[in-house]
Image (cartoon, grey):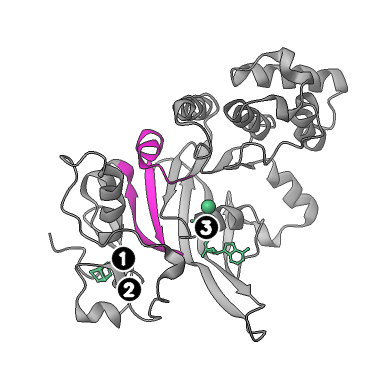
Amino acid sequence: MSAPLLLEGRDLSVVYRRSGGLFGTSSELAALDHVSFTLGAGETLAIVGESGSGKSTLARAVLRLVALTAGQVLLRGEDLAILTEAELRARRRELQMIFQDPFASLDPRMRIAEILAQPLRVFEPALNRAQRRERAAAQLAGVGLDAAMLDRYPHQFSGGQAQRIGIARALIAAPSVLVCDEPVSALDVSIRTQVLELLAEQRAKRGLALLFIAHDLAAVRFLCDRTLVLYRGQIMEQGPTAQLFAAARHPYTRALLDAALIADPLRARRRTARPEAAPARLAEPSRQGCPFVSRCAQQQPRCSVERPALRNVGGLQVACHRADER
Ligand SMILES: Nc1ncnc2c1ncn2[C@@H]1O[C@H](COP(=O)(O)OP(=O)(O)O)[C@@H](O)[C@H]1O
Ligand code: SF4
Ligand SMILES: [Mg+2]
């Protein structure tokens, strides 16, 4: 990777404890299991995987919205966990997030002007009220909305407009990394492309790095330099997006790509895995074996007992015993 390293996740693990079973039992779920990634300045990394694979947990762990069970998040080489509160607050300026629900970051009781001014109050306290309003107006114009909308409330906007305001809010204090958790999946199909184009435009203009969580593989292909594939909280495969889409080696990645192509049967390849089942209803994966074994059409006896390590195969990193057989 040529860009300087900006954000790094090292061996990130998050275990959720669920209590309140029928007999007061509790269980543990490893939602993220030793996941490592790097993000260079100005780079876009996609995190993909079915619902329940741990994508949002990864985003939240990076932003410290959920506690890590193990691992470190480093921003410009600094471990966020060992910073003081004041230092962490300053770093927060660099890391911002947009959510799937476009209204999630917009307080319904506040006017848009106030919503946009809020990060400036925290990160640029020297600005006065008029200056904050001016910045908010410019920011709104930058995401394609009219400055006259500053005095409206969130409920007066459509989902697409609200997501534009969410993007404006996240970017107003000039972060270097934007974490996007399925930023268009709650929007009407007709406006998804516009919002993705806005993200691409803002990224180019500001040299922003994006951690882009998505269900929509077409959006990933459009926007992302590299792609990381999660399944049950573990990395199955990662590498340059173009290469991964053209020649994925992991049966799970190929199943995801096939599912995305199913609407176009002429282009769909031979299916390599069983159709998607609801993750919650699957049996717990074997601790030692491959997490994908219960759905893999290419499994061999050793797949149930030996967990495949992530290794380099033809320019991709793949966690599959059979990755080099093609
Ligand atoms: N707060 C929580 N408490 C317990 N389990 C959770 C919590 N949040 C998520 N999970 C579980 O962790 C797994 C990963 O969830 P999540 O990170 O939301 O996945 P994704 O974003 O890929 O859909 C799922 O099985 C989900 O049910
Ligand atoms: S390690 Fe075995 S079960 Fe796992 S994806 Fe590869 S072939 Fe399938
Ligand atoms: Mg999610």
Residue type, label 1: Ala
Which element carries disc 2, helix, strand or loop? loop
> Circle 1: is it few (<14), some (14-19), or many (20+) Cα within 10 Å?
many
Residue that carries the numbered disc 3 in the rendered image: 9
Residue that carries the numbered disc 2 in the rendered image: 290
Asked whether mark 2 lies closer than 8 Å to ligand 2, one says yes
Residue stretch in magenta: 213-241
Q: Is residue 268 visible?
A: yes
Which element carries disc 3, helix, strand or loop? strand
Residue depicted at x 50% and y 31%? 188
Residue 187, x across and y down, in percent: 52, 34
Alpha-carbon distance for marks 3 and 2?
Answer: 23 Å
Res 261 → quadrant = top left
Say whether residue 237 is left or right of residue 302.
right
> Circle 3: is it few (<14), some (14-19), or many (20+) Cα within 10 Å?
many
Say whether residue 51 is left or right of residue 16.
left
Residue that carries the numbered disc 1 in the rendered image: 319
Between 61 and 253, the one lying in front of the other is 253
Asked whether mark 1 lies closer than 8 Å to ligand 2, one says yes
